[in-house]
Image (cartoon, helix red, strand yellow):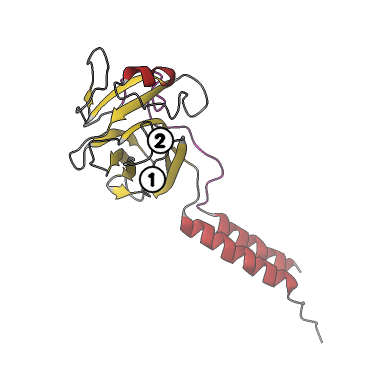
Amino acid sequence: MLLRLSAIASAIAVVTSGASASAGPNLVVNGDFSAGNSGFSTGYALTTMTPYLFQNGVHGIYAIEPAGSVAASSAYGDWTNVSTDPSGGNGNVYAADGATNANTTIWSETVSVTPNTDYVFSYYGVEISNACCSNATFVPSVNGVNGPTFDTDASWQNSAFVWYSGSSTTATLALTDTNLSGPFNDFLVDDFSFSSGVPEPASWAMMLIGVAGLGAMMRRPGRRLA
């Protein structure tokens, strides 16, 4: 019995090693844009046009503004899909008329990371113009490794993926829009976050295999001594 308990304890140590127990702090600075137009880089141009920040035929531009002010800042008249930030408030959001040049970075930030650690890159997005026709298609990346494609629609949605740092000590986070259409393709993004604490897929697989092995060990009858 003692031998079996020792084996079980050893198996538990193996299947749980490397699996993070809790999420770390958000490493992104100003991910919710509460500090305005700061803490990030972009390939888009900051718009200062009047009387509307967003006007016909001008693409690849952005503004940081309260969610409730977005509709009135556009000359298009159809930027009405949402009027709040992802949490339902009137916080700042990144509003943009999509770029028509390939690989134009919407948002980017570089953070320090711990080697051999899992991180989750997460953000929210929504198509703010009429969602009938040519919506933004986001591709996030970390150090050039792409996450899942995110096709926006008329309501806020969250997208996230896990990235493993390996030997890296810094991570450059980026978001691009692969839709290069001028008409429509207008969007909001908000609440960028990047934090540690999710086991990598290999850890999950090891944990499942280990748990299955523990079950088999506990079901196996002990050998009687003659």
Assess whether residue 173 is covered by the magenta stretch. no
Asked if disc 2 and disc 1 are in contact, CB closer than 8 Å, the reply is yes
Q: Where is residue 117 in the image (x, y as percent from the top left)?
A: 42, 47
**Residue 97 image-quadrant placement:** top left
Q: How many discs appear?
A: 2
Decide: few, some or many residues near mark 1? Use Cα within 10 Å; few <14, some 14-19, many ≥20: some
Q: Which range of residues does the magenta coloring cover? A: 18-39
Residue 59 visible (yes or no): yes
Task: Identify the residue shown where x is 74% and y is 66%.
Answer: 2
**Residue 37 image-quadrant placement:** top left
Task: Give the numbered dot on residue 125.
Answer: 2
Which residue in the protein does label 1 denote? 150
Q: Position of residue 107 (x, y in %)?
A: 30, 33
Q: Where is residue 49 in the image (x, y as percent from the top left)?
A: 22, 16
Tell me which secondary structure the magenta stretch mostly adopts: loop
Dot 2 falls on a residue whose secondary structure is strand
Image quarter of the C terminus: bottom right
